[in-house]
Structure formats: C-alpha cells, structure tokens
Amino acid sequence: MSNPNDDGGGLRPALPSRWQVAVHEAAHAVYAHRQGVTVVFVTVEGIVAAENGGISGGYLGRCRPDWDGENGPLTGVLGCALSLVGLAAAFRAGWPEPLLPYPEFVLEAQAKNPRSDAGQVFALLRSADDPEGLYEAARAEAEASVDEHWSEIVALAERLMEAETLTEREVDAALGRPGWGAFREMLDEMRLAEDAAPWTKGEGEETF
C-alpha cells in the first residue's frame, strides 16, 4: 500500500490505520497465493515507521509476489484484481475509499503514483482492448475474493500486526496450506532422497 500522501493527488487528512494496512497487504497475499503465485514477503513496516515519526519510503506496506522464473506478472483480470483486492479489503476494514466505478477510478488513477495499486491497474488498462470491461470484471473479482476469503485475510492480517513482516514460509503457514515455495523445497528433498537411494537406476541397471 503506497502512502496516500505521496500519490500526487493532494494531501489526505490522515493515514490509514495499521490494521487497515495489514488487511490491505494480507488481501494481496491471499489472492496471489490462491493464484499459485509465491509470496516472497509481506510487511507493514512502512506504516509502523510512519506512526513513529519515521520515513516510510513511500510505502506503508508491501506484498512481494515472486515473478522470477516461470512466473511472469499476472495480467488481464487477474493482474488488475491482484492490485484492486487490497483496496477492496481496506475499505471493508474501515478505510473510507471504496473501489470506484470505471470513469471515477480512471480520473483518480491518472494522478496516482505509478507504483501504487491504482497506478499499476491504470497501466494495465491503457494497453487493454476494452479497458472499462477489464476494470469492471477485475473490480467484481476483487470484491468477491475479499468476501469469500475474508477469514483468511483477517487471520494473515492479525499475524502481520504481531510480526510486522512475514516471510514466504510464514505466509504459507498462516494460510494453513503449503504454497509453491514449500512445495518446491519438498520436491528438492525428494530428488535428493531419490539420488541417495540404493535402488536408483544406474546405467544398464534395472530398478525394482
């Protein structure tokens, strides 16, 4: 979640609460995780620093998906929804800004920091054949995801309130199921065990 006072659209009277930021970032993490995308880390250290009079670095919270290797950034409805889901969750947590209909969203998004969620969605919309249709489909997807997975979002946000930053494995553990990172480690361990097994097939040999 970018600092709303850094968005270029004028100062707002107050920052979101730490809980609203935690819910916002947790929603990103839950959505990415459910799309099979590894979450490298999620943090609310920026809002903690801002609350203590420090510098947030432009971000109040961050959720870092792993786009390395075969995982390219999500595009289309999923890519837009990944950015919008945090805004939808923050609104449910009490932040007074809902997801706006397309015309109003575009007007506001143009003035946003390009690194912000709205700025990233705006960039995706600019290259779309039907930007309004894409946005409205993504808005519906984001709001439905928040409604359907609210308990998971809250559980992860509560962990963020305690720890401030969660690693990939901690996110997986908090969501109660292995993510790709844990699965990848399990596969590596299985390969090592297979290599060390006495019945592993060698050249000219048979296995049983």
Image (cartoon, rainbow, N blue to C red):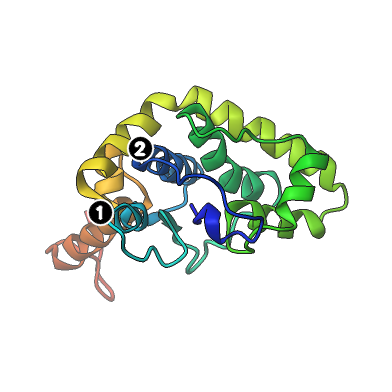
The residue wearing badge 1 is 186
Whichever of labels 1 and 2 marks the residue nearer the N terminus, that label is: 2
How many C-alpha atoms fall within 10 Å of the one at disc 2: few (<14), some, or many (≥20)? Answer: many
User: In the visual, does 183 lie left or right of 124?
Assistant: left
Question: Which label belongs to residue 130?
Answer: none
Q: Residue at x 14, y 67 (%)?
A: 196
Q: Residue at x 27, y 38 (%)?
A: 174
Mark 2: amino acid: Trp
Q: Position of residue 125 (x, y in %)?
A: 77, 53
User: In the visual, does 8 lie left or right of 42?
Assistant: right
| Residue 176, visible in the rendered structure | no
Q: Position of residue 72 (x, y in %)?
A: 57, 63
The residue wearing badge 2 is 19
Callout 1: SS: helix
Quarter of the image holding residue 57? Answer: bottom left
Q: Nearer the viewer, mark 1 or mark 2?
A: 2
Mark 1: amino acid: Met
Q: Position of residue 1 (x, y in %)?
A: 48, 52
Q: Nearer the viewer, residue 72 or 205?
A: 72
Q: Nearer the viewer, residue 30 or 203?
A: 30
